[in-house]
Amino acid sequence: QDTPSKIIEALRKIYSRPQILKPLRPDVLVMTPWFVPIVWEGTYNLEILNEQFQQRNITVGLTVFAIKKYVVFLKTFLETAEMYFMVGHKVNYYIFTDRPQEVPKVELKEGRNVVVLQVQNYSRWQEISMRRMEMINHFSQKQFINEVDYLVCVDVDMRFNDLVGVEILSNLFGTLHPGFYGSERRSFTYERRPASQAYVPHDEGDFYYAAAFFGGTVKEVYKLTKKCHEAIMVDKDNGIEAIWQEESHLNKYFVYHKPTKILSPEYLWDDSLGRPQILRKRRFLAVPKDHDAIKNK
Ligand code: 2GW
Ligand code: MN
């Protein structure tokens, strides 16, 4: 029987206390001007966070698209996710694909499931990439809302290389694009043509976020993907396509709906960019795909 004192004993955790006079990271920004954390190694205690999320008994959905030849990325993606993604929590992998037979069978730990969602493919790669917003939106309302608490939406041409856990979870989160964290606002590759719904003026915007890693509660991801998809459709009617497709629309959204947590480039790295000092971990890495068999952009 769990008496109150037994419960309290079970919840007791020993860890070093936070020290007001000792900054967690002297080398990087760890909080935005709207008071949300930027997640870097060294800024959080995963034990405390795991305890909190365990108590809430949450389930996380990881959405990933593997259309046409991109099914080749699934095996490594899933195998490494089993090692590093939300270890100890319940996870549903939502795999959107036009080739359900080619989804590899990967051995899963307890409490973790693969859900294959068959979707159509599009001939243009830009369309494949952009339509993710529509499909995530559709399934959020239809299915995800009944099955998971949070959604994490990522590219598939990636592998997990270190822990990615509940420290990323919040109502609405975005990830700093690895190519632009040190850039000036003027050089962010936002859509700069006023004719596009993704337009961001030169004197606005906080960060340049990547479309390859975002998420939040199902409700917030529903709202984000709805707005982005609608904007993409308006652009289509007007015969314009944003410079970086859905990434441009995501960035526009985040200017006016600021994330409640931001992930550092530890969560989206590409080794072709080298290994700067500030990067204590490389948690989620791009898999090289320059060979023509995979991609002709
Ligand atoms: C994409 C480009 C060229 C040829 C094929 C594809 C393709 C993408 C495909 O045939 N099948 C497929 O499932 N995809 C999905 O779209 C897959 O999930 C992939 O990870 C995602 C984005 O395409 P990707 O990874 O080739 O583009 P990247 O790595 O250059 O990603 C950045 O730019 C994209 C838009 O141009 C997106 O914004 C993406 O989120 C960014 O990381
Ligand atoms: Mn990619």
Image: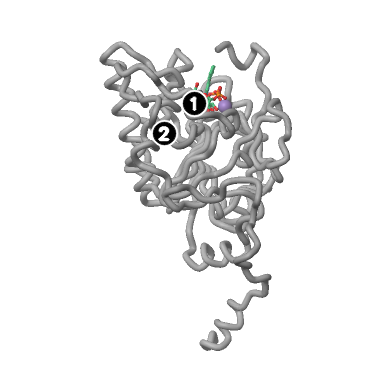
What residue is shown at x 48% (from left), y 39% (from top)? 214
* Above or below, 294 relative to 50: above
Q: Quadrant of residue 141?
A: top left
Q: Relative to 121, is 85 above or below?
A: below
Classify the position of the C terminus by image quarter: top right
Q: Are marks 2 and 1 in contact (CB under 8 Å)?
A: yes
The image quadrant where one finds ligand 2 is: top right
Report the residue marked by disc 2.
205
Q: Nearer the viewer, residue 36 or 240?
A: 36
Q: Which mark is residue 2?
A: none
Q: What amino acid type should be assigned to the residue bearing mark 2? A: Gly
Instruction: Calculate the distance from the C-alpha at mark 2 to the C-alpha at mark 1.
Output: 9 Å
In the rendered view of the protein, which quadrant contains the N terminus? bottom right
Circle on res. 188: 1
User: What residue is shown at x 40% (from left), y 21% (from top)?
Assistant: 191
Nearer the N terminus, badge 2 or badge 1?
A: 1
**Element on which disc 1 rests:** loop
Residue 192, x across and y down, in percent: 39, 19
Q: Residue at (52%, 29%) from the top-left corner?
A: 184
Q: Amino acid at mark 1?
A: Phe
Considering the numbered disc 2 on the image, is that residue within a helix, a strand or a loop?
loop
In the visual, does 24 lie left or right of 7? right
Q: Is mark 2 within 8 Å of ligand 1?
A: no
Q: Position of residue 102 (x, y in %)?
A: 58, 28
How many marks on residues?
2
Q: Position of residue 227 (x, y in %)?
A: 31, 34
Q: Nearer the viewer, residue 131 or 106?
A: 131
Residue at left offset 72%, top offset 30%: 274
Indicate whether 294 appears above or below 287: above
Work out whether residue 105 can be spotted: no
Q: Residues within 10 Å of mark 1 (few under 14, many from 20)?
A: many
